[in-house]
Image (cartoon, helix red, strand yellow):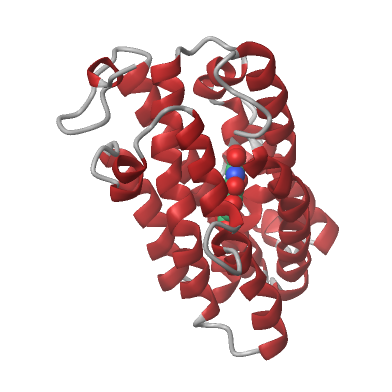
Amino acid sequence: MNASAADLPRALAPHDRELLSPEQLEARLRAIGAERYHDKHPFHGLLHGGQLDRGQVQAWALNRFEYQRCIPLKDAALLARIEDPQLRRVWRQRIVDHDGEREGDGGIARWLHLTDALGLDRELVESGRALLPATRFAVQAYIHFVRERSLLEAIASSLTELFAPTIIGQRVAGMLANYDFVSPKALAYFDSRLHQAPQDANFALDYVKRHARTREQQDAVCDALRFKCEVLWSMLDALHLAYVEPRLIPPGAFDPRRMPS
Ligand SMILES: O=C(O)c1cc(C(=O)O)c2c(n1)C(=O)C(=O)c1cc(C(=O)O)[nH]c1-2
């Protein structure tokens, strides 16, 4: 049997440990997204294809709010570690995008318009008490990763956003076509993300291409992106297990059957 370099342990494949050019690094990152990004998860196929009922869509929006809620916490943790004022100036915009400049503005408020439109109680959504445990753990893992790893890895972990515009396009078109309980106004969150995500992702991509100067750093950047794909994937696994198959809703988690419709 012929073993390829990819099958060999790292120590046995020294030729595969050379510094990558910035373009090669980008190609590796894009290949990771092509294989592992959460657009490939079956739950998204069901969501976008109109195969979920209102309760299942509510469960998705309620759990995804935890991600939205914590993104500014993650970015604040990252910001606190940046020494360069120029980089801080760019990165702080992410917090503004989510929090807005005033009450009722920004991505978090827009996500709450979606949960409102789906008929979810705001207090329930904001309290987080009906979350799936795995949602909470996955989101916390992301915050911890950003706090504990190098700045380069922390920035690289945001690179899933490179792949977000495609899935957002599929989501908006699919949900509007398939669910009579979803309106363009309810999905307004995604309109802003369509221009924010590419800006953010291109900046982060350029940063890692310029700052990953050793092969070890380049590998760490790729691992950070794999880790983040796993965060997103595990959130959808948890939704699938609880609300699609085998419908194993953990104690205390949101249960659409118990909601007034
Ligand atoms: O709808 C999506 O599929 C999706 C994915 C991602 C992502 O890839 O991490 C983000 C978002 N949305 C998003 O709305 C968002 O604000 C966001 C921030 C980040 C990040 O890692 O800093 N990812 C994402």
Direction left: furthest residue: 251
Residue 131 image-quadrant placement: top left
- The residue positioned 74% from the left and 35% from the top of the image is 166
**Where residue 76 appears, x then y in whole percent?**
49, 73
Residue 18 can be seen, yes or no: yes
Q: Tell me the quarter of the picture where residue 257 sits.
A: top left
Residue 196 x, y percent position in the rendering: 73, 55
In depth, the one of 236 and 176 nearer the eye is: 176
211 to 229, vertically: above or below:
below
Residue at (38, 14) in percent of width and height: 244
Tag count: 0
State which quarter of the image contains the N terminus. Answer: top right
Q: Is residue 251 left or right of residue 73?
A: left
Residue at 57% x, 67% y: name it. Answer: 102
Left or right, 120 with respect to 153, comes to left
Where on the picture, by quarter, is residue 254? top left
Q: Is residue 86 above or below residue 156?
A: below
Using residue 76 as the reference point, say whether residue 202 is left or right of it: right
Residue 164 vertical placement versus 154 (above, below): above
Instruction: Please tell me which residue is depicted at 68% across the width and 30% down the height of the picture.
Output: 184
- Front position in the image: 33 or 235: 235
Note whether 202 is above or below 245 in the view shown.
below
105, 25: nearer the viewer = 105
Residue 229 appears in the rendering: no
Q: Position of residue 198 (x, y in %)?
A: 77, 52
Q: Which image quarter holds the C terminus?
A: top left
In percent of width and height, residue 171 lies at 65, 27
Direction from residue 205 to residue 71 in the image, left or right = left
